Amino acid sequence: MDCIFCKIVEGTIPSKKVLENEHVVAFHDIQPAAPVHVLVIPKKHIASMNDVGQDDWGLMGEVLRAAQQVAQETGIAESGYRLVNNCGAEGGQVVYHLHVHVMGGEKLGPLNSK
């Protein structure tokens, strides 16, 4: 498997980590769309939300718990932040390893609603 996020989990590709535990890794996005832009990924490879299995829902809770902790640790919890998960090509997913974007640090505009 040639997954860039799996390589970050393995430590073969460096990242600027915000937090790590036995279930997840959170690191700064290399192309930030906000002053604070951190990705939270499960250590287990799951390609997208469509691939979350019955046994993975506890892990998804860990991803959301980590996102909350990232917001607190980066100082955006009180002012507000956005969580985004892109799923599939038309949903904007580029890396096929499930991840949640934690974005904040400024007033974020509305999402594009064509």
Image (cartoon, rainbow, N blue to C red):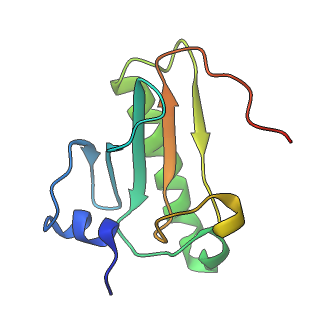
Q: Position of residue 15 (x, y in %)?
A: 20, 50
Identify the residue shown where x is 39% and y is 34%. Answer: 70
Q: How many numbered callouts?
A: 0
Q: Position of residue 104 (x, y in %)?
A: 50, 24
Compared across the picture, whether 65 is left or right of 83 comes to: left
Compared across the picture, whether 42 is left or right of 82 comes to: left
Q: Residue furthest front?
A: 114
Identify the residue shown where x is 41% and y is 58%. Answer: 41
Q: Is residue 96 above or below residue 28?
A: below
Compared across the picture, whether 111 is left or right of 45 comes to: right
Q: Is residue 67 above or below residue 51?
A: above
- Which image quarter: residue 52? bottom right
Q: Nearer the viewer, residue 55 or 37?
A: 37
Quarter holding the C terminus? top right
Q: Is residue 34 above or below residue 94?
A: above
Compared across the picture, whether 90 is left or right of 94 comes to: right
Quarter holding the N terminus? bottom left
Identify the residue shown where x is 51% and y is 63%. Answer: 94
Q: Residue furthest bottom?
A: 1
Identify the residue shown where x is 15% and y is 55%. Answer: 14
Q: Position of residue 34 (x, y in %)?
A: 47, 28
